[in-house]
Image (cartoon, rainbow, N blue to C red):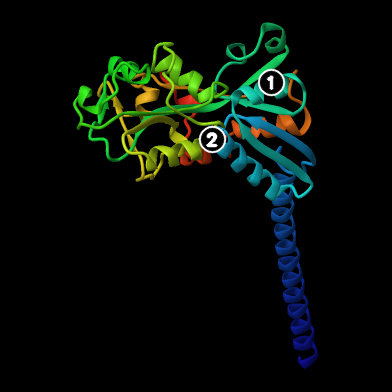
Amino acid sequence: MKKTLAIIMAIALMSVTITACNSTSSSTSTTSTASTGTTSTASSSPYSGLSGSISMDGSSALAPLAQAAADSLKDANPNLSITVNAGGSGKGLTDIANKSVDIGNSDVFASEKLTPDKANGLVDHQVCLIGVATVVNPSVTVSNLTKAQLISIFTGKVTNWNQVGGSDQTIVIVNRPTTSGTRALFKKDALNGAEEATGKALQQDDSGVLEQTVAQTKGAIGYLALSYTGGKTDIKLLQLDGVAPTYDNIYSGKYPVWGYEHMYTNGDATGVVKSFIDYMTSSDFASTVTKDGYGLAADMKTK
């Protein structure tokens, strides 16, 4: 009887051991599968494992967003080098036409700045929208201008703010250089093509310098991309014909002063240059686009 009982107990012990081993084997298998899945997802990303170098210059309005994309990609790709410079849309378009950079950034179409023989070889990549606002020194009491009033100010026909409902204060125009894409966009959409009168002209197309100049000059007026105006208290944004310069108003077609931001390549984009431009327009980067004061082309309700 004792011998029979010992045999039964031995069989039971073997059964428990086998069950435990099977359980451990199953757990190990599940962990391995999860780990493999994670590795596969990361390695399949089109924005990882990049190496090489990219150089670009041009639009000062697009430069901050391009730099944000460059920083993001370089953090994930230590063997990738990206250099972002500004200098104005004219410089960016000239340099990409001459193949001295990999990407030429512009606020306007290449055909607006280059001769046909130079522009025809370039490929346009529209990466986002940019709105442009009329900005004034906080001492200016006016908060809205009609387009006719705006044109009269920038062409020098109106020289005092009291002529457009403000206080008795001389108007000081802050000009961008003629190479500026922001200037070309503002001239076309806000001034109906009229030439600006000579004012306090900047030597370089630098939005930061323009903002500072307007902020420090009583009675000053200029214009800035919306990417430079967020949260600023040292300048004041004006409405145009009663419409505020916001992306909601741009998307709906109510606010007219905006344009596409262009990244031009000389021929089709390839390699890491293509990866960079693809990243700029990807859903992975969309939240940065809007956070930094740019608009999404996909959200435009009118063209």
* Residue 13 picture quarter: bottom right
Q: Is residue 48 above or below residue 117?
A: below
Q: Position of residue 75 (x, y in %)?
A: 68, 50
At label 2, counting other C-alpha atoms closer than 10 Å, the crowd grade (few under 14, some 14-19, many 20 or more) is some
Q: Is residue 289 visible?
A: yes
**Is disc 2 placed on a helix, strand or loop?**
loop
Q: Position of residue 227 (x, y in %)?
A: 47, 36
* Residue 29 picture quarter: bottom right
Q: Amino acid at mark 2?
A: Asp
62 relative position to 71: left or right: left
275 relative position to 232: left or right: right
At label 1, counting other C-alpha atoms closer than 10 Å, the crowd grade (few under 14, some 14-19, many 20 or more) is many
Q: Which residue is mark 2?
A: 206
Q: Position of residue 80 (x, y in %)?
A: 76, 44
* Quadrant in the picture for the C terminus: top left
Q: Which residue is mark 1?
A: 94
* Quadrant in the picture for the N terminus: bottom right
What residue appears at the point 70 percent right and 63 percent down from the top-left corner? 27
140 relative position to 191: left or right: left
Instruction: Pick the residue in front: 268 or 12.
Output: 268
Instruction: Pick the residue in front: 179 or 288.
Output: 179
Q: Amino acid at mark 1?
A: Thr
Q: Which mark is residue 46?
A: none
**Is disc 1 placed on a helix, strand or loop?**
helix
Q: Earlier in the sequence, mark 2 or mark 1?
A: 1
